[in-house]
Structure formats: C-alpha cells, structure tokens
Image (tube, rainbow, N blue to C red):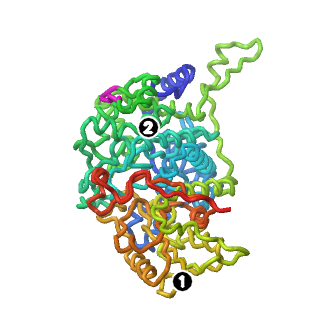
Amino acid sequence: MASPLTSADDEALIEEILARLTLREKLGQMMQPDWRTFRSAPKLSEAGAAVLPAWAGSAVKRALNAPLTDEQCDRSVGRHCLGSVLGGGGACPTPNEPLAWQAQAAAMQRAALRASSGLPLLVCNDSANLRDATLFPHHIGQGCMRDEGLVEELGALAARESAACGINWIFSPCAAVALDLRWGRTYESFSEDPALCGRLSAAEVRGIQRCGLPMAACAKHWVADGGTALGTGKFDMGGIGKAAVKSFGLDQGNADCDDAELRATHVAPYLPALAEGVLTVMVSYSSLNGVKCHASRALVTGLLKEELGHARLREITRDAPRLGLLKEELGFRGVVGSEERLFGDLTWRRQLEELEAAVGRGDVPAERVDDAVRRVLRVKVACGLLRRAAASTPAGGDAAAAASRCPLFDAAVPPMGDAACVGCEAHRAAARRAVAKSCVLLVNEGGLLPLPAGEGGRPAAELLVTGIAADSLGRQCGGWSLEWQGCEGNAFTTGTTIADAIRAVQPGARLAPSAGAASRPVAVVVTGEAPYAEGFGDVEELRLPPADVRAAVALADAGWAVVLLLVTGRPLLLPPPLLSRVAAVLVAWLPGTEGDGVADVLFGRAPATGRLSFSWPHAMDQAAAAARLKGPLFPFGHGLQTRAVG
C-alpha cells in the first residue's frame, strides 16, 4: 500500500460494511453533490451568479445559501445514502457564523445516519468560506517562507477552524508546479520548483491530518495542471454554457510533456504527500498530451492507484531523479476525486441514475464500484468517522444472538471543533508571523527598509501611504476567500489592512487615494492585482495598475523615497522607468487578513527573510518558467535580508 492508512482490523470492518451495502447505497457513497442543490433555489449555479450584475448575483446567492432544513437533508442525503457533500466556492449557510455551519453540518450528518446505509458523511470544502475566519497567506507566499514547520502549523490551524464548521475534508494542498505566470492559479502553487512544492505539500498534509480532529487532506490536481500550454485553456468558469478558448487561456488546458518531464516536474511533488499518508487526491480537469486526465487509465488507475510498497515510495521520494514512474507504481489506496465540472450538465441525481443503469448493463463492472466505495470507507475509517462498534454480550446470554443484534459500527454525529477558535487571537498571531516571513524584499537602495518607527506614537519621518491595494482586505486575501472569485473592499470579513497596520505604527501617516507631488520624505505605494480565481485569473499581460505606476514615478521624481509594496498572486512586470526610480520593492503576495505582518517587516519589528519561490521575469517573453532560465530579473531564491530593530 502507498501509505499505512488503515490497519488489518480496519480493512476487515470495511469489507464487512461493503458486503452489507446494496448497489444504490454503494453508488450514493461515491457521490459528492454541492449542498446548495438540496434547496429549492434558482437553477443558475453559484458560478453562474458570479458573472451576473451585482444586484442579480446577490439575489441568487441569498437563495442558494438559505439554511438547510431537516426535510431537505433527508430528501437528498438520506434518500440517496450520500457518502459526501461539497460546499463549493462561496458556499455558506445563513448567517455565515460557526454555529450556523455546525447546525447545518449536524443536520446533514443526522440525515446520513438515518439513511439505510447509516454511514457518516464526509463534508468537504476548500476551506471554510466563513466570515471572520483567519485567512493565511496563499501558497505562493508560504513557498517564500521556506519553513516546513510553519506551513504544517498553518495547515493545522486552518483545519481546526474548518472543523469548527463541521467540515472534515479540506481540498488542499495544491501540489501543482505552476510553469506559466499567466495562469490564474499561480498563487495556489507553492513554487516553480518541484522539490519545494513536494516538501511543503507534505508539511501541509501533516498539519491538516494531525490537527487532533477528524480531517482529510487532498493533494490536487492530478496531474500536470500547472504545465498547460498557452491558448489551450477552455474558459467556461461561469457555468453558463459559453465555453471559449482564450488566446492566452491556460486553465483546464492541455499539457504536452514526455515521461521524463511528467515524472520529474509534475509527479514528483505528490510523492512526499503520498508518503505522508494523504487520504485523498483530486484529478485535474485539464488534459495531458491531448487526453483528459479523468479519462486516462494510465494516469489514474495505472500510475496513481496500483500497488507499490510504502517502503519503495519513501525510497523514491528520497531520490527524486530515480523516479522511474510509468504505470502501476504508486499504490494509492485513498479516495480519488473528480473535478466538479466533469459531468457537464448532468445533475448528481441524474448521474446516479445513469451510473446505476451502466452497472446493470455491465458497462461499469461491479468490482469497479466496490473499489471506489472501499476507498471512501477507508478515508472515513482513517479519519475516525467510522469504527467498529464494541460487542456487548450480557452474562449468560446467547453470544450468537447478541452478535446479530449488535451494530457493526458506531453511528454518531462526528465531533466538531470549538467555534471559539475561529479568528481567535492565537490563530491571527500565527498568521501575522507567516505574513512577515513570506514577504520578499527585492530592492532596498541605501538600506531604506526598515523604516524608522518613531517614538511616543509620533512618526520619525513624514509618511504617505497610497495605492489601490493600501486599504483593501479583498486585495490582500485574493481569490477563494469567502467568495470563489474573492471580494473587494473591507466589509466581508475581519482583518487589518496594510494601511491600518502602518498607521498603528505611525499614526501620523497620511492615507491618500491618489498621490500628489508634494515634497515628502517617504511614500509607500501599495499596488497589485484585483482578486480572481481559476479561469477568470488567466491574463495576457503581467501588468501593474497603470495609475499606481504613474503615481510612483511622479512621487520619485518629486523627491520622495518610494517603497513599492506589491500585493499579488504572481510576479508582475516591473517596468524599467519604475524600477530605476523606486528605492525599495517589497512583495507581500496575498497575505490574507493580517496586514500587521507586512508592517512588521516595513518597520523592522520582524526581519525580512523571505526568498522568491518563483523567479521574476524581465518581460512578457519570460512568463514561462523555461524562458526565465536564461536570466530572470530576480532569480529563484532571491530575497534581501534585514534585521529586526529593537
């Protein structure tokens, strides 16, 4: 087996449960519908609502997020013996608070236990889309920390906040190696370096699955989703049937690579996660060499699932150049999940009907169904959701009769975490440390940073804070934060913007929506990207906002010492006229809710120690990693260091 997920006794229990299930109960265990489909709601999906005008999208979202009733849970979860449910991007109960999440999860779990199969649910999400949760730096920033222990800690904290909402399966880590910076999922990748991706993916798996509560991690997206070719991405992320191929599209596209590149670049990051015992793997919706990954028996059944000893896996993990991976090698025994859009317009209920008919015709072997259900049960056992019931025989009683009455497994609503941990001070303190450690100092002319903090609440120097991202939690948090495509503004959650964090250190700092050219000593121009996720984030050019570029140049020409502070999900081009004028460039990536961590580096409360997890391009012809090998603007691993002050 690829990892010691279960014991021999666990496997025996799994086989006994499997033998008791009917075909329909087995098929229900294989399904993972979005819980929003359990309501009577508009037919347009949450994804479709995202591309509607704001007023219409809000109305659809309110309907989609109406609280689930017991009747709705029984009608869907109970009647169909579902094995898992999904809360897709932006899914949340109303009100969007931990106790409401727990109540909804408990209602779904009770419905599952009342079903004829009686098996507890896997409740899945990328992470809780919860108002006031602690939002940590995205993976691209975590890659710059070079700290496996801290990545593990953040994984555990995210898992605990998710468990407090009744979630027990998190769709993370993303083990993809992003090779083209134009890809809208670049920030989900730890690095362009497969070895770093692998180490940090394994660290996150440890954090999630050893958080002390029932929780499964998921390595995604199998495989080579970060290597798709420009112009092959099909853009239908709105779910409104208007698929198109962008000339610069990458998401859901096709990766052309030979065996050597597949092994060394795209498979290698999964090996440490598999060796660490990751319980689930999600297959990519993209293609490899013209074949959809979902449709590739060689990639999924052959390469991922077939038997390879755990000791052998650890051996090849230690010696990545000797991978030699072709077919039937990794022996993964956990759940292999599909992307949500795999079945197109078929509803999950229709999928159940079609699958049942296919098994009846012999198109889908019964053994294939048993293998899938066995994997689902294995994850539930490994998470502690499912365990053998203790036998109880009264003194002098008939042991055989007692055994026939004894339930095979315990059936109870799984434990959930403490709601008080969500957004708590300890979690936010850890996030702040991570933010500071993930910041990368690219340029520091004359040792401008750290800035003097001043004394007695009075600034040591005049300071202007400006730029489109200076006072925006939405830009700090990026995509996949509460909403699928992210949020603009500050009202959607609790946190500290970079501007507020700076003013906490220097109350006299002036925040200006647009910078004039008055003579002031230091200006911090906070700029970067608007929030995005997936296909919406594929771009043609890696451009900074033009207005902020003009403002930074004008300030520098007027005698200001300009600190360019980038809030971004990927390296963006730094035009020579801009780079030649600014005194410092600090990259904060997508730091999440704790802007204080950025101010800590600016003012020397924490040292600058981050090192680039992606090399930085000179120009657009270096958007692809291979082109950057010939001489990037800043190489992989670059990062100027400063010391903490006082």
Which residue shows up at 44% across the image and 73% down it?
582
Residue at image x 48%, y 52%?
A: 144
The answer to which of 582 and 46 lies nearer the viewer is 582
Q: Which image quadrant for residue 46?
A: bottom left
| Residue 574 belongs to magenta span | no
- The vertical placement of 45 against 110, above or below, is below
Would you say the magenta stretch is mainly helix, strand or loop?
loop
Q: Which residues are magenta?
A: 322-328
Is residue 559 in view?
A: yes
Q: Amino acid at mark 1?
A: Arg
Q: Quadrant of the C terminus?
A: bottom right
3 lies left or right of 393: left
Tag 1 residue? 520
User: What residue would you read off at disc 2?
Assistant: 30
Residue 471, position as x, y percentages in the image? 54, 73
| Three-letter amino acid code of the residue under disc 2 | Met
